[in-house]
Image: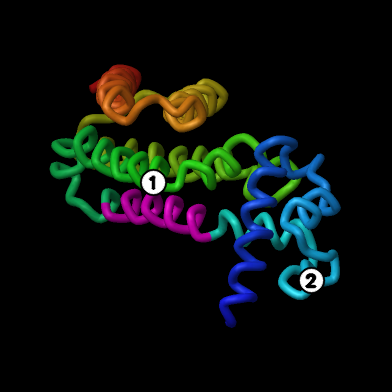
Amino acid sequence: MSAEELTTLEAIHMAAKAEFLEKGFQSASLRNIVKTAGVTTGAFYGYYDSTEELFEALVREQYDTFMGAYKKTIQEFGEMSPQRQMDNLGTFSFQCVHDMLLYAYDNLTEFKLLLCYSDGTPFAGMLDEMVEIETKATHDFQETLERIGKPSPMIDPQLEHILITGMFNAYFELIIHEIPMEQAEIYLSQMWDFYCAGWYKIMGQ
């Protein structure tokens, strides 16, 4: 890719980010993007077939990295012995969400796009995907408790969904409101203590 092409692509990306952040994906105007970028519509279509493809180019790497880290942590936790799961539930999960928070802050624009402006794209389902994964992990942990003789009472599925969704919404609020990192880390630590204690309580541990 030549220097001229890179400059054109960067201009399109900068203009697109501004347009999506102002109007959201569904209301964004390709005409405004190319005008702001100082390129023709034809030049745009030399890079992307649609605004959907453009939006994906802006956030795909961050989405994959974030979700990959989360899924890896869930997998590694599930591979631990039952006793290690019991001993490390809070600290292991906290390290994951802390590292993910640092990554999100290093890519704040892309995560604002993902969390606030992605309606109409496949990325709008990120929260629901995380809730689904966490729900399964919760059930797996309950099965672990059962195996080691510490059975957990059944949690009403609707309540479980509300609690897990609320947990991730609280987490994402740190990013959405751009809480200063030093303060966000304190909030995250307190939030995780709160949720872990609540989950232990509701699971009868």
Taking the spot 30% from the left edge, 44% from the top edge, the residue there is 99
Asked if residue 160 shows in the view, the reply is no
Q: Position of residue 203 (x, y in %)?
A: 32, 24
- In this view, which residue lies farthest toward the bottom? 1
Which is nearer the N-term, disc 2 or disc 1? 2
Image-based side of 204 in relation to 33, left or right: left
Say the numbered circle drawn on residue 106: 1
Compared to residue 70, the image places residue 142 above or below, namely above
Q: Residues within 10 Å of mark 1 (few under 14, many from 20)?
A: few
Pair 2/1: label in front: 2
Q: Position of residue 74 (x, y in %)?
A: 34, 49
Q: What range is drawn magenta here?
A: 61-76
Taking the spot 39% from the left edge, 46% from the top edge, the residue there is 106
Say the numbered circle drawn on residue 43: 2
Taking the spot 22% from the left edge, 41% from the top edge, the residue there is 92
Residue type highlighted by circle 1: Asp
Image-based side of 67 in relation to 103, left or right: right
Whether label 2 touches label 1, CB < 8 Å: no
In reply to whether residue 153 is colored magenta, the answer given is no
Compared to residue 2, the image places residue 130 above or below, namely above
Q: Position of residue 130 (x, y in %)?
A: 50, 42
Q: Nearer the viewer, residue 169 or 83?
A: 169
